Amino acid sequence: MIVRNSAVVALFVVLSGYGLNGSIAGEVEIVTAKASSSTRGWTFSVTLKHDDTGWDHYADLWQVYTPEGHLLGERVLLHPHVDEQPFTRSLSGVKIPESVSQVVIRARDTVHGVSSQEYKLNLTR
């Protein structure tokens, strides 16, 4: 019985270090995105959610790609948003070829890198 209880305690300690209580952030999530066109290019507004913990772990970037994987633009996030969740940031002047009717948005954080989530956004011209 002692071995089993020790194993349970050890498992709890390991799992609690991985954020089961929500204190350690996971991958960044793209909540929503919008795009609008003007004569100067496209403007994207992207809302991210991430349990930023400070300078050591925060959402630091989102990018706009063609479905084929060509980078069209990126918004670098220069600081953590610990007390502002979810948060929205915009990027203007993105040039989108006329043949592109959908883009893929990806986001990144400083610990996990690029999130496995891909947010597909149809463009209305």
Image (cartoon, grey):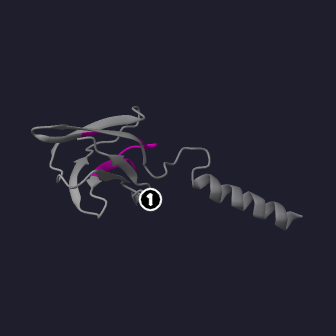
Q: Nearer the viewer, residue 120 or 6?
A: 120
Q: Residue furthest right?
A: 1
Is residue 113 highlighted in magenta? no
Is the C terminus in the top left, top right, bottom left or bottom right quadrant?
top left
Classify 10 Å Cα crowding around label 1: few (below 14), some (14-19), many (20 and above).
few
Specify the farthest residue to the bottom: 3
Q: Is residue 88 left or right of residue 86?
A: left
Amino acid carrying mark 1 in the image = Ser
Question: Measuring 43% from the left and 49% from the top, which residue is drawn there?
Answer: 28
Q: Position of residue 84 (x, y in %)?
A: 39, 32
Residue ranking furthest to the left: 39
Horizontal side of residue 46 vs 74, given as left or right: right
Choose top left, top right, bottom left or bottom right for residue 48: top left
Instruction: Give the number of callouts.
Output: 1
The reply to whether residue 46 is visible in this rendering is no
Q: Quadrant of the N terminus?
A: bottom right
Residue drawn at x 40%, y 37% as measured from the top left: 82
* Disc 1, SS: loop
Residue 42, image x, y percentages: 19, 42
Q: Residue at x 82, y 60 (%)?
A: 5
The answer to whether residue 23 is visible is yes
Find out whether residue 61 is within the magenta segment: yes
Residue farthest toward the top in the current orientation of the protein: 83
- Residue 121 x, y percent position in the rendering: 35, 47
Which stretch appears magenta? 44-63
**Disc 1: which residue:** 116
Where in the figure is residue 124, as x and y percent of width and height? 27, 41
